[in-house]
Image (tube, helix red, strand yellow):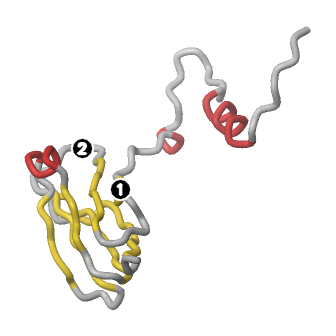
Amino acid sequence: MAHSPPLTRLARCARTAHTARLRPGAAPPAASIAPPAAFLLLLPNPSTGHVRVGYGLPQTAAVVELRVYDQWGQPVGTYALTDEALASGVWLRLRAGIYLCHLVADGTVRAKERLLITAER
């Protein structure tokens, strides 16, 4: 009998999550299916001043924007995340500090990320 390598904890959890047994023809319970989540990607983080922006939404939105706030909650800027802007690359240029970035789709905050900008060496 061949011995398989031990599974990592994450792999065991993923395998267990996908092997739930259902009666033939039964639909999974609605509560067990998580809706897709929105995400905001800021790279690199921490950075020395130039940050590339990426995001994902579970459904399309008419208006998508990135709102940036400083560590005291004061607005720093609002950036429209249009398809044209994302194709050419959306970059933020910020001074050293801690920022809170909100991904807003159709007026609703969908994701939040902290961003650390360090002084250049």
Do tag 2 and tag 1 residues touch (Cβ < 8 Å)? no
Identify the residue at the far front of this view.
Answer: 121
Where residue 32 sits: x, y (%)? Answer: 53, 41
Residue tagged by mark 1? 41
Rendered-image quadrant of the C terminus: bottom left
Where residue 82 sits: x, y (%)? Answer: 11, 52
**Mark found first going from the N terminus, 2 or 1:** 1
Seen in the picture, residue 106 relative to 61 is either above or below; the reply is below
Seen in the picture, residue 80 relative to 74 is either above or below; the reply is above
Left or right for 121, reference 94: right
Q: Nearer the viewer, mark 2 or mark 1?
A: 1
Left or right for 18, reference 93: right
Who is closer to the viewer here, 104 or 113? 113
Amino acid carrying mark 2 in the image: Gln
Q: Secondary structure at mark 1?
A: strand
Q: CA distance from mark 2 to mark 1?
A: 17 Å
Quarter of the figure with residue 75 = bottom left
Quarter of the figure with residue 92 = bottom left
Q: Residues within 10 Å of mark 2 (few under 14, many from 20)?
A: few
Rendered-image quadrant of the N terminus: top right
Residue tagged by mark 2? 59
Quarter of the figure with residue 96 = bottom left
